[in-house]
Image (cartoon, grey):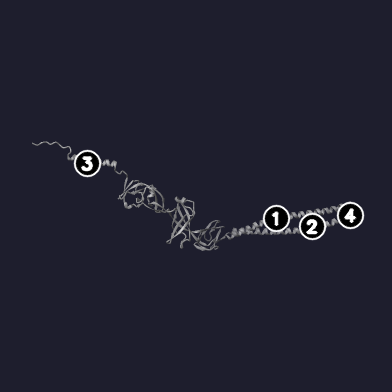
Amino acid sequence: MDKVLPKKFWNKQRIILSVLGAIFFSFVIWQFAFADKRSKLNVDAEKLTVSEVIEGNFDEYIIVQGVVQPLKTIQLDAIVGGYVTQKLVDGGSMVKDGDIILRLENQQLKLNFLQSETEASRLVNDLQNTRQRLKVEKFNLQKTLSDLDFQMAQAKDVWDRNEKLKSSNMVSDLDYQKSKRDYDRLVKQRQIEIESQKYQQENAELQIKQLEGTLVRTQKNVDLWRQTLENLVVKAPVTGLLSSINVEIGSNISQGQNIGQIDDMNGFKLRADIDEHYISRIFTGLKASFEFNSGKYEMEIIKVYPEVNNGRFAVDMTFVKNAPDGIRRGQSSPVKIELGQSQKAILLPVGGFFSDTGGNWVYVVEGGSKRASKRKISLGRKNPNYYEVLDGLTVGDKVITSSYSNHGDKEVLELK
């Protein structure tokens, strides 16, 4: 007879279910307590640039593109207007100081010169006539005074004689008084004549002085018109290269119009545009260097232009010693401008990450794993090759320095 056995509680099925439940429960606890909940993104490691943080000398400098220009450029502006009758030199030609470049024609200027010359001639004639009249008046005064002196002498003799005769009652009182009045009249007439001639002489001398002053001013005016006519011939003010001339025969030129420029070939400078970020750190006397034909040439900033256009400002640099042979106007080349002394620092290579993070954080590869996590950092100065690391990174750290534009805001990158 069979015996009924009691059922076991921990049978195989329950044991399996219990184990699976325990595993599931442990997994849930681990997820809540220990699992990495950071947002992740799978990326292709071959498309990333990973750079190592190093320690070395930080050279603070910037690289700018300099353009070769003549040390001096002389602008040719028309001093007077006119139409071009001759063009003797074309652009790109060497000219010497005083060489004729253009001939202009201006009939109005010639007419003004002739009128001024005619006025000067008239004033010269008036001055000569006034001087001649003054001489004649002096001669007339001498003649008049001579006649009056003769008449006075005769009247004085008559008066003296009548005075003697009057004491003897041999002449009437009427005749005596008449002779006396005749003499007194001639004396007064002589005084009046002298005063009149003095006034006329002073007036004539004043006229001469005024005419002389007017003549001097008119002659200066004539000289000015003559110089103006000479400016119708446009000459090279210096020896150099006539790099441009913007007129042709028959064209009409206005006064002050720019007609070309001459480059002084005795020296060169480099002009470069610099980002306005550095405007407070760029000043005259700052050192720079320029490489040309395998040689290095020291330079110095001589002028800083304060105007900022499109986020950039310009500087002029000259060679400390002689300019290199073979350099030509218009050539461009990189120029290294030194902003400070070399110092020891922790360095992070420059990369596209900065435009996405502003240098506030980077992805750092965790040890030898295939994972990179976000880390806050602080960066200082920058040169074309490195950033200066102030905080957040140590020597030997591996940092993704390529662009983060495709990574969104993920905290962890899984490198595949």
Residue at the spot 85% in from the left edge and 55% down from the top edge: 156
Q: For this rendering, which residue is in front, 119 or 211?
A: 211
Mark 1 and mark 4: span between their CA atoms?
51 Å
Please, what secondary structure does the residue beneath circle 2 have?
helix
Number of the front mark, 1 or 4: 4
Q: Which residue was labeled with disc 2?
A: 145
- The circle on residue 364 is none
Number of the front mark, 3 or 4: 3
Name the amino acid type tagged 3.
Leu
* Residue 126 image position (x, y, % from top left): 69, 58
Residue furthest to the front: 344
Q: Which residue was labeled with disc 1?
A: 207
Question: Nearer the N terminus, badge 2 or badge 1?
Answer: 2
Mark 1 and mark 3: span between their CA atoms?
134 Å
Q: For this rendering, which residue is in front, 111 or 103?
A: 103
Q: Are marks 1 and 3 in contact (CB under 8 Å)?
A: no
Q: Which residue was labeled with disc 3?
A: 20
189 sits left or right of 169 in the view: left
301 sits left or right of 6 in the view: right
Mark 3 and mark 2: span between their CA atoms?
158 Å
Question: Nearer the N terminus, badge 4 or badge 2?
Answer: 2
